[in-house]
Image (tube, rainbow, N blue to C red):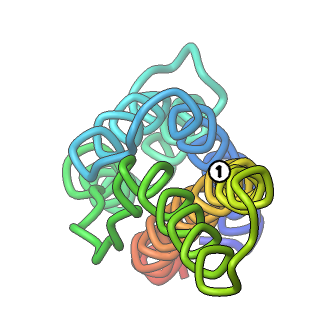
Amino acid sequence: MDTTEKEKFESLWSDFVALVKGKLMTTSTKQKLTTPLANLILADAASSWGTEYEINGKWLSKLKETEPEKAELVRDILLNDIKFNDIDTKSDLPDYYNYVIPAVGACAGLAISMYVGCGKLVQAISTITPAVLLYPAVKTFRSSMHTTSQNKNIDNYILQLEKYKNSIVSILS
């Protein structure tokens, strides 16, 4: 096997990985990304290797004409073996944190204003202000935590594809 087949595969593989990553990112914005869902997305993308109507499938068909044994091994990896393993995911802060943290801030503001001996108006302002300021801050923090967690999960899934690429490259070498 000449290096051009290996190079063609690596080029197709990088497009394949970009497609899978894009689909994972799009899906994660709409719903929680779980391993079964990620495997469904991967299987859908991997099906392009099994049809001659896609560029990936055309490459595999041409490989089958020149190297049938290698092509069958590659096909088996791409269509049957490829899947994501479970990854360790961190759970997000529960929704009630949006309300608990501002409520604690409001209680602290009230307690401090009462301790200092302020009037009713200052106590009301000291109670409302922390709650009003903390709610959007907590919501933004939770949202950014969720996005960071999802991106880390997607990167972990994409890293798992490297072993399949290495197996196929070793077959083609």
Q: Residue furthest top?
A: 53
Q: Nearer the viewer, residue 166 or 108?
A: 108
Which element carries disc 1, helix, strand or loop? helix
Q: Residue at x 61, y 43 (%)?
A: 25
Image quadrant assignment for residue 56: top right
Categorize mark 1 by other alpha carbons within 10 Å: few (<14), some (14-19), many (20+). Answer: some
Residue 130's x, y, as percent? 71, 61
Q: Residue at x 52, y 40 (%)?
A: 28
Residue type at the position of mark 1: Tyr
Q: Nearer the viewer, residue 80 or 21?
A: 21
Q: Quadrant of the N terminus?
A: bottom right
Image quadrant assignment for residue 157: bottom left
Quickly name the residue at label 1.
135
Q: Is residue 70 left or right of residue 170?
A: left
Q: Nearer the viewer, residue 20 or 144?
A: 144
Q: Is residue 23 left or right of residue 73?
A: right
The relative height of residue 108 versus residue 49 in the rendered view (above or below) is: below
Q: Residue at x 29, y 45 (%)?
A: 39
Q: Is residue 171 left or right of residue 148?
A: left
Number of on-image labels: 1
Q: Nearer the viewer, residue 82 or 71?
A: 82
Q: Residue at x 52, y 47 (%)?
A: 63
Residue 135's x, y, as percent? 65, 50
